[in-house]
Image (tube, rainbow, N blue to C red):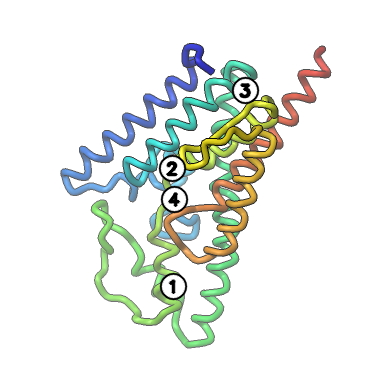
């Protein structure tokens, strides 16, 4: 893990850094790139198809990108050196898409529930949709809004973007645990080394717990992490099967 950073991992670090720098520059000019490049719920008026990819390179703040890029450097380098650049970029992007898919599958159920409740109250969900369009500075285009709890929840679903490489990163974490199960890992606040085959599944279990505990719209997309981990596991397992078959 002390080797030179491989090509794809290095380029991903650079791209993420450039996107974060662009976010700061545009924000100083009154434009929030997270509105344009973050990933909104597919049923939102703010959703665009390019967000499926671009959201993986956007981050909420410095701490967010710092932790993700540190994990990309530490785990991505080892995984790319093992499976090769072509398989690595496939794993990274598909894990990121898997995170988006699972997160929004869960949100889809929540949105349908809210819409059904609004209809029983005589509130037209289309009105909420129409009033949820964001300007480039992340302000609502229309200031008027229905003042009702479920309507506000639906609006929040439409105006809250998902940003970050965390889905892809969790795919890499799982891949690392499968490839290097005996490697010992530790956290700053838990400096005792624990084997990857125990450490990373424990993190995934914690994400699952937090995902169900914090089911409402919140600042951490736990199910995006889990979606990325699931895709990472499926892909790295298939890669190992093919490796043994070639041998």
Q: Which residue is more in the foreground, 168 or 120? A: 168
What is the CA distance from the residue labelled 2 to the residue labelled 1? 29 Å
What residue is rendered at 42% in x and 46% in y? 163
Is residue 172 visible in the rendered image? The answer is no
| Image quadrant in which the N terminus is located | top right
What residue is rendered at 53% in x and 86% in y? 120
Mark whose residue sits in front, 2 or 3: 2
* Residue 239 left/right relative to 32: right
Mark whose residue sits in front, 1 or 4: 4
Label 1 crowd (10 A; few <14 / some 14-19 / many >=20)? few
Q: Residue 87 carries which label?
A: 3
Mark whose residue sits in front, 2 or 1: 2
* Disc on the earlier residue, 1 or 4: 1
Residue tagged 1: 126
What residue is rendered at 53% in x and 21% in y? 77
- Furthest residue toward left: 29
What is the CA distance from the residue labelled 1 to the residue labelled 3? 43 Å
Residue tagged 4: 162
Quick one: SS at disc 1?
Answer: helix
- Furthest residue toward front: 192
What is the CA distance from the residue labelled 1 to the residue labelled 4? 22 Å
Q: Do the residues labelled 2 and 1 touch (CB within 8 Å)?
A: no
* Disc on the earlier residue, 2 or 3: 3
> How far from the left and from the top, in percent, is residue 160?
40, 58
Q: Are marks 4 and 2 in contact (CB under 8 Å)?
A: yes
* Disc on the earlier residue, 2 or 1: 1
């Amino acid at each position: 893990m002390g080797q030179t950073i491989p090509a794809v991992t290095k380029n991903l670090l650079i791209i993420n850094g450039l996107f974060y720098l662009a976010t700061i520059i545009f924000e100083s000019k009154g434009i929030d790139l997270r509105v344009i490049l973050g990933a909104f719920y597919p049923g939102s008026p703010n959703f665009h198809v390019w967000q499926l990819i671009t959201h993986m390179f956007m981050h909420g703040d410095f701490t967010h990108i710092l932790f993700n890029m540190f994990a990309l450097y530490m785990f991505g380098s080892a995984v790319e050196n093992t499976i090769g650049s072509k398989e690595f970029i496939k794993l990274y992007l598909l894990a990121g898409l898997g995170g988006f898919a699972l997160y929004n599958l869960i949100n889809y159920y929540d949105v349908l529930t809210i819409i059904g409740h609004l209809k029983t109250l005589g509130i037209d969900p289309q009105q909420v949709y129409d009033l949820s369009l964001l300007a480039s500075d992340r302000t609502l285009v229309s200031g008027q809004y229905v003042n009702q709890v479920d309507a506000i929840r639906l609006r929040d679903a439409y105006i809250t973007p998902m940003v970050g490489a965390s889905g892809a990163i969790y795919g890499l974490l799982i891949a690392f645990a499968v490839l290097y199960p005996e490697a010992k890992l530790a956290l700053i606040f838990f400096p005792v080394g624990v084997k990857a085959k125990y450490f990373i599944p424990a993190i995934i279990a914690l994400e699952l717990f937090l995902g169900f505990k914090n089911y409402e719209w919140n600042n951490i997309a736990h199910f995006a992490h889990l979606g990325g981990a699931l895709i990472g596991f499926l892909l790295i397992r298939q890669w190992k099967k093919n490796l043994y078959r070639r041998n």
